[in-house]
Image (spheres, rainbow, N blue to C red):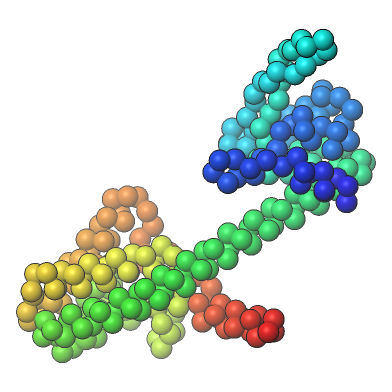
Amino acid sequence: MATIQQLDAVKKISTTGGEYWMARDILSVLGYSSWERLMEAVSRAHNSCKETNVDPSDHFHITVKMVEIGSGAKREVEDWFLTRYACYLIAMNGESSKPEIADAQRYFAIQTRNQELSTQIADENRRLLLRDRVKDGNKKLGSAAKRAGVQRYAVFHDAGYQGLYGMGIVKLKQRKGIAPKEDLYDTAGSSELAANEFRITQTEESLRKKNIRGEFQATEEHRKIGAKVRQTISELGNTLPENLPLAPSIKKLQSARRKALKSKS
């Protein structure tokens, strides 16, 4: 426990809110009696980072600082800026017989898992927000389509899918393995939802600003804008929406959250 408390005590926060540690601060915390022995673990961790195809320069950064050596004299010594991931690798490549190393391994493994969960929750929140915005946007688009004279709403909306996905909704659901009666957006990830929101909002604005009238003209406008969004995704070199993987069901996420809130209350 002492090691965990000490690691928390020497942790620093960057101006952007990121956590980092200085190698000389964790030297004694990890149970090393000399800088050279710690550097052996840092070297192994650095190589381990390379082997996982992660750029070590993103996590290990060498620096120098001035330290007092007595009588007011100072000299430069080497030090390292270390991210949480770098510290985790150092602990995993340290002398496992040391109780301090075992504590550090648990500490950074838990910290890394907590960060993963935090990132997952943030993405889930973004998906829920985007899904609500897509739902609201579709209502506004439906109103704009009605003013334009659209009567066959299924044909009108399918044109937007054909433009964005390169295929209609029936074929798209078959391709993605979505049941015919299931909502396309329930298993769409953030990127796919954002692409659809852009298609929807831009079509609604275009119908209104151009004062488009007639079902055929409105439907073709929807198809054209969907295709433009698709073209932009392609030009950026990003994954086309029909090739994006299915995300966990939003309905299930919402149900799980409701149950969690109910159990807490």
Q: Is residue 47 visible to the viewer in this orientation of the structure?
A: no
Tell which of 223 and 123 is nearer to you.
Answer: 123
**x and y percent of residue 83 in the render?**
65, 40
Q: Quadrant of residue 239?
A: bottom left
Residue found at x 28% / y 50% = 235
Q: Is residue 260 visible to the viewer in this orientation of the structure?
A: yes
Q: Quadrant of residue 69?
A: top right
**x and y percent of residue 199 in the render?**
27, 68
Residue found at x 59% / y 40% = 14
Q: Is residue 66 above or below residue 207?
A: above
**x and y percent of residue 183 in the render?**
41, 82
Where does the C terminus fall, quadrant-wise?
Answer: bottom right
**x and y percent of residue 238 in the render?**
37, 53
Q: Is residue 171 above or below residue 34?
A: below
Residue found at x 74% / y 12% = 74
**Total count of labels:** 0
Looking at the image, the residue that sits furthest to the front is 72
Residue 159 shown left or right of residue 238 in the figure: left
Residue 34 shown left or right of residue 121 in the figure: right
Residue 58 shown left or right of residue 164 in the figure: right
Residue found at x 25% / y 79% = 140
Residue 255 shown left or right of residue 51 in the figure: left
Q: Is residue 50 above or below residue 174?
A: above
